[in-house]
């Protein structure tokens, strides 16, 4: 018997109305279409390191993946070898003491950690302080879980640091978390101990948990520091760190958070209900990577990006943009000339006339609407070609 045609009216969850498709997901579809048409777009948009991890890291992965017993489920807390390596790395590079058994939680990248921390600390309707400009995921994931986003300004004339006088005048009732990110993305502003001390003092006085996202501290920066260097910070701060940038391992999805043991247990309660432990050989390889030599970091994190940065600076100058030469991290952030009404007038012109994709700063917040961001995650020859293409654009 033929069934009558039925009209289904299935609707998505209301939370989908609070977010849109991630900008890079949407824009890279356009870039892929242009490439399919033979336009050969050079992408200087995303911060995905294009160099490999250390040889020892890859060797340990391959050796352990050959073992028959290596393929079972793993504990959500991570294997002891990885947690011990993470604690040793924090002591060696930041001079921060962490108990590997209780004060560290391995993550499948920091992006995952943003969700888990938000679910562990924030109820629907609670407020979170989010930097403007800032990483879009701080906003989107908190909107998904029903948080109230309260933006705080980062401005160029304040060296992209929070204005604490402005913060003190805000209604902070109901604020649970303050998201910070230094060295800063997208602006490249570096951290200082004075800044971290101010942030910790602010958090303690207002009973706020600070989550400091710290994946860029090794890139073009010979003096990495942690917010956990501040005495007592562990009581009110959580710090994310990721192997994606510092160890050339973006696709491996290994990161960590460090904080006090109570916070770790709250976060683990969420995480253990969402995912399982990472593949054991990958964890062992990550533990090996945490023991990379200073010489490896000097070449991978400093020398490579220094050479590339010269081309990015030349591109900025060719476009008439201004920028701070003291920036660190794997991007270059620059202010566009006054002749452009908005940033997309420039970035779309570059994309369609020079076939070079550069990120418009508005995606990071309203305070980024007059800026562009150039990724250094491209080979020198690609950056040189991008520069030559841009030189040929007609004003």
Image (spheres, rainbow, N blue to C red):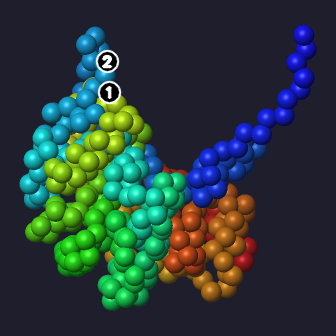
Circle 1 residues within 10 Å: few <14, some 14–19, many ≥20: some
Marks 1 & 2, CB-CB < 8 Å contact: yes
The residue indicated by pointer 2 is 71
The reply to whether residue 96 is visible in this rendering is: yes
Which is more N-terminal, label 2 or label 1?
Answer: 2
Residue 152, position in %: x, y?
42, 77
Residue 347, position in %: x, y?
64, 67
The residue indicated by pointer 1 is 279
- Quarter of the image containing the C terminus? bottom right
Which numbered circle lies on residue 289? none
- Quarter of the image containing the N terminus? top right
Residue 272, located in which quarter of the rendered image? top left
Residue 157, located in which quarter of the rendered image? bottom left
Task: Describe residue 308's horizontal placement relative to residue 194 as left or right.
Answer: right
Image point (36%, 70%), residue name: 175
67 to 45, vertically: above or below: above
Secondary structure of the residue carrying numbered label 1: loop
Image point (42%, 65%), residue name: 126
């Amino acid at each position: 018997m033929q069934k009558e045609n039925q009209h289904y009216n299935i609707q998505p969850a209301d939370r989908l109305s609070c977010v849109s498709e991630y900008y890079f997901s949407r824009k890279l579809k356009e870039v892929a279409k242009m490439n399919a048409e033979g336009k050969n777009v050079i992408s200087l948009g995303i911060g995905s390191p294009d160099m490999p991890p250390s040889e020892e890291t890859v060797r340990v992965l391959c050796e352990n993946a050959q073992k028959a017993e290596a393929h079972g489920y793993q504990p959500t807390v991570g294997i002891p070898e990885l947690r011990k390596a993470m604690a040793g790395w924090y002591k060696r590079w930041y001079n921060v003491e962490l108990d590997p058994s209780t004060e560290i939680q391995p993550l499948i990248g920091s992006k995952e950690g943003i969700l888990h921390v938000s679910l562990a600390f924030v109820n629907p309707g609670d407020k979170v302080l989010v930097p403007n400009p800032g990483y879009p995921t701080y906003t989107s994931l908190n909107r998904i879980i029903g948080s109230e986003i309260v933006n705080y300004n980062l401005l160029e004339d304040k060296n992209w640091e929070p204005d604490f006088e402005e913060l003190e005048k805000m209604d902070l009732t109901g604020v649970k978390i303050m998201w910070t990110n230094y060295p800063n993305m997208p602006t490249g502003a570096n951290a200082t101990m004075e800044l971290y001390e101010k942030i910790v003092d602010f958090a303690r006085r207002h009973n706020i948990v600070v989550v400091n996202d710290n994946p860029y501290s090794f890139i073009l920066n010979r003096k990495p520091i942690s917010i956990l260097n501040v005495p007592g910070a562990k009581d009110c701060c959580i710090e994310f760190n990721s192997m994606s940038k510092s160890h050339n391992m973006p696709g491996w999805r290994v990161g960590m958070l460090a904080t006090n043991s109570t916070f770790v247990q709250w976060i683990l309660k969420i995480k253990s209900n969402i995912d399982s432990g990472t593949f054991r050989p990958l964890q062992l390889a990550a533990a090996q990577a945490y023991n990379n030599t200073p010489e490896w970091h000097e070449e991978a994190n400093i020398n490579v990006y220094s050479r590339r940065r010269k081309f990015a600076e030349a591109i900025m100058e060719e476009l008439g943009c201004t920028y701070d030469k003291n920036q660190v991290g794997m991007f270059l952030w620059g202010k566009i000339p006054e002749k452009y009404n908005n940033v997309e007038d420039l970035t779309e012109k570059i994309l369609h006339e020079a076939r070079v994709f550069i990120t418009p700063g508005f995606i990071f917040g309203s305070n980024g609407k007059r800026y562009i961001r150039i990724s250094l995650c491209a080979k020198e020859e690609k950056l040189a070609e991008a520069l030559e293409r841009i030189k040929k654009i007609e004003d």
